[in-house]
Image (cartoon, rainbow, N blue to C red):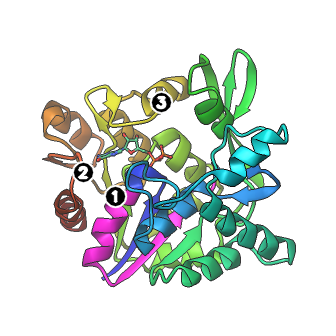
Amino acid sequence: MRVVALAGGTGSAKLLRGLASLVRDLTVVSNVGDNFWAQGLYVCPDVDIAMYTLAGVANPATGWGLRGDTFRTLSQLGALGEETWFALGDLDMATHLVRTRLLKEGRSLTQATDSLRMAFGVSQKILPLTDDHVETRVVTRAGSLHLQEFWVRERGRPAVRKVEYSGAGKASPTPSVRKAVAQADRIVVCPANPVTSVGPMLAVPGFLEDLSSSRGRVTALSPMVGRAPFSGPAGKLMKAFGVRPDSAGVAKMYSRFLDAVVIDSRDADMAPEIERTGVKCATSDTLMKTPDDEVRLSKELLTA
Ligand code: GDP
């Protein structure tokens, strides 16, 4: 079975680990909206979380960065008067150095990502959705902020007016992404922030149509329980984006391409409403605390 997983960051990575243990032909299509220049290096947080998780080297405490990493370079940068709110580990920095050099030599982000994932011994393909620069921007009362500035530097505190995907209108999905989606038997939307991880993908012209016309069945694991996400700022951003901050809102936002969704058992009362939008709804314990949860939910998504 050919499986394509649409992935954001830390929530998605847990499901990717489960899927990778079950499926030989797994391709990850990664969000690029939180890509960011830090210390002159091009950082792709979601690509790297997927790559480090599948390589088995991710930091288990945070879900991002590398296990056992240290931050001596960052503290020296601070001593030199540089901004250090975006934490780059000493080992993690090697990834960004290689990626930035490859891009400067003229390689595409797809090519740079492929070189890196092979160097990390990851057998699954990791495809950035687009080689164009798309940036998720959060418009607050204090002005427009890059998602990383909003979430990491400002700790998600400013009141949000709207969310924009700068550059998305002129971007296109890469040919490798389009081919993977067209040939997939299953497309799994990992639990991810609908506004900052899936939204930037859907904003790239053509991708929504690629998903809805794919012959593969599309299933999603909801990132919400009740009116809140398991982690992160999804609820606040969904409200600002005009999406109801619960599983029914997620299902509605994805309904143009979604065949089935797995929501938390505690939200079982939302199932009839979801099914009225034409999306099949299954319920489960959707929190992934252990590797067994990751595998169990992966199986449920592959059969939903
Ligand atoms: P981020 O960029 O690290 O915030 O990562 P994502 O885009 O992957 O978003 C994280 C989303 O995953 C949040 O909306 C969480 O609610 C969700 N999430 C995190 N852990 C779990 C989990 O164990 N189960 C489910 N269903 N969702 C989760």
Q: Earlier in the sequence, mark 1 or mark 3?
A: 1
As helix, strand or loop, the secondary structure at mark 1 comes to: helix
| Residue 301 position in % (x across, y down) | 24, 61
Image location of residue 80, percent across then percent down = 84, 42
User: Which residue lies under the disc numbered 1?
Assistant: 14
| 235 to 98, vertically: above or below | above
Mark 2 falls on what kind of element? Answer: loop
Q: Amino acid at mark 1?
A: Lys
Dot 2 crowding, Cα within 10 Å, few <14, some 14–19, many 20+: some
Q: Nearer the viewer, mark 2 or mark 3?
A: 2
Whether pointer 1 and pointer 2 mark residues with C-beta atoms closer than 8 Å, the reply is yes
Indicate yes or no whether the magenta region holds residue 194.
no
* Stretch of the chain drawn in magenta: 13-32
Residue beneath label 3, please? 238
Asked if the beta carbon under badge 1 is closer than 8 A to the nearest atom of ligand 1, the reply is yes
The answer to which of 290 and 103 lies nearer the viewer is 290
Determine whether the residue tagged by mark 3 lies in a helix, strand or loop.
helix
Q: Is residue 240 left or right of residue 222?
A: right
Disc assigned to residue 303 = none
Q: Residue type at mark 2?
A: Met
Q: Residue at x 59, y 55 (%)?
A: 45
Report how far apart the C-alphas of labels 2 and 3 lie in the structure.
22 Å
- Relative to 144, is 263 above or below? below
Task: Please indicate whether residue 244 sits to the left or right of residue 287 in the image.
Answer: right
* Of the pair 298 and 87, the residue shown nearer to us: 87
| Mark 1–mark 2 distance (CA, rounded to whole Å) | 7 Å
Residue located at (30% from left, 57% from top): 259
> How many callouts does the rendering have?
3
User: What amino acid type is highlighted by mark number 3?
Assistant: Met
